[in-house]
């Protein structure tokens, strides 16, 4: 027995199962991450042609199967088409990284409406503005927070001591965040140096409610690189993800392009 459900849904990824059919992974507010089969989606007269694409938010109508089953898409239409994500490679790269993070970190069928709202806001931001690498950190920090594994940034992750007050700080993925000076000295081999500017940047990204606020934060390329390196190790450790795709994406993202991007 299956019922028909309707929901906004972000296209995270798809793969072909036959010449004409696809399995599409979506993120929805009320059903979490779901997969639907789209039969005949590539046939010339399919009602699905042009109705969904990567990183779009669509209105999806589907037959819900058992809780863990593969649902069947009945129809869909783009609500937020975000054509810029198909024209600007930096934005596409960031969108692809965010989608991969959600696919790797969120179990299927576990509704987390905030994550859907944050991803929607991030994709809108990426499609509307020039790239600003801290918006990805904003998304990662909020996702980690919602999954209960956010890095500790206010007090020492080892002893709870005050971070401010002098001495070199470090950051440890395994310990779960910032280490104040005495603990940093004891773990110097295992933890990365954390500069005060990067700590401030991480805190500002965590506090921001929306990507538009992140865009008002002044950053330097060196600080962004350090922040992304620390966050990358943190995500890899706590979400059990391969860190390499993220490193490559962010390295490319920060690299100045010899050619102006199409705009
Ligand atoms: Zn400490």
Image: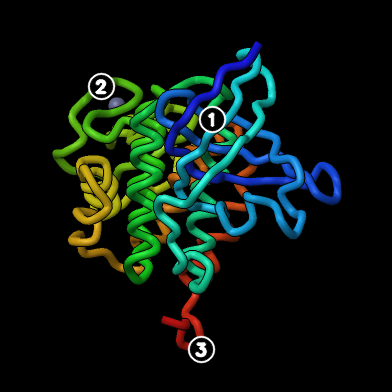
The residue pinned by badge 3 equals 259
Q: Are marks 2 and 3 in contact (CB under 8 Å)?
A: no
Q: Is residue 30 above or below residue 143?
A: above
User: Which residue reaches farthest front?
Assistant: 45
The residue pinned by badge 1 equals 33
Query: Which of label 1 and label 3 is nearer to you?
Result: 1
Q: Could you give the CA–CA distance between mark 1 and mark 2, rounded to whole angstroms? A: 35 Å
Query: Quick one: quadrant of the N terminus?
Result: top right
Q: Are marks 1 and 3 in contact (CB under 8 Å)?
A: no
Locate residue 140: give its quadrant. top left
User: Which residue reaches farthest bottom?
Assistant: 259
Relative to the observer, which residue lies in front, 194 or 185? 194
Locate residue 181: give its quadrant. top left
Q: Earlier in the sequence, mark 1 or mark 2?
A: 1
Query: Quick one: quadrant of the C terminus?
Result: bottom left
Q: Earlier in the sequence, mark 2 or mark 3?
A: 2
Q: Is mark 3 within 8 Å of ligand 1?
A: no
Point 20% across, 59% down: residue: 217
Badge 2 marks a residue whose secondary structure is: loop
Tell me where residue 21 appears, x and y as whole percent.
77, 44
**Label 2: few (<14), some or many (≥20) within 10 Å?**
few
The residue pinned by badge 2 equals 160
Q: Is residue 22 left or right of residue 257?
A: right
Badge 1 marks a residue whose secondary structure is: strand
Tell me where residue 47 appears, x and y as whole percent.
63, 50
**Label 1: few (<14), some or many (≥20) within 10 Å?**
many
Point 85% across, 45% down: residue: 18
**Label 3: few (<14), some or many (≥20) within 10 Å?**
few
> Ligand 1 quadrant?
top left
Point 41% across, 50% down: residue: 79
């Amino acid at each position: 027995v299956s019922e028909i459900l309707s929901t906004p849904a972000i296209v995270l990824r798809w793969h072909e199962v036959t010449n004409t059919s696809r399995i599409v992974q979506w993120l929805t507010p009320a059903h979490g991450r779901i997969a639907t089969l789209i039969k005949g989606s590539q046939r010339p007269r399919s009602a699905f042609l042009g109705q969904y694409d990567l990183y779009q938010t669509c209105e999806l109508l589907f037959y819900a199967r058992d809780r863990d089953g593969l649902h069947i898409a009945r129809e869909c239409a783009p609500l937020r088409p975000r054509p810029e994500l198909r024209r600007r490679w930096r934005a596409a790269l960031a969108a692809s990284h965010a989608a991969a993070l959600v696919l790797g970190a969120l179990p299927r069928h576990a509704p987390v409406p905030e994550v859907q709202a944050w991803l929607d806001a991030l994709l809108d931001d990426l499609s509307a503005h020039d790239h600003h690498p801290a918006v990805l950190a904003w998304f990662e920090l909020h996702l980690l927070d919602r999954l209960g594994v956010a890095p500790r940034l206010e007090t020492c992750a080892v002893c709870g001591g005050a971070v401010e007050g002098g001495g070199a700080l470090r950051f440890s993925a395994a310990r779960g965040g910032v280490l104040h000076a005495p603990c940093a000295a004891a773990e110097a081999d295992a933890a990365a140096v954390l500069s005060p500017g990067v700590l401030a940047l991480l805190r500002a990204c965590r506090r921001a409610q929306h990507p538009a606020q992140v865009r008002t934060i002044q950053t330097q390329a060196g600080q962004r690189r350090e922040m992304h390196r620390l966050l990358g190790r943190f995500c890899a450790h706590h979400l059990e993800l391969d860190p390499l795709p993220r490193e490559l994406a962010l390295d490319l993202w920060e690299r100045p392009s010899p050619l102006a991007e199409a705009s």
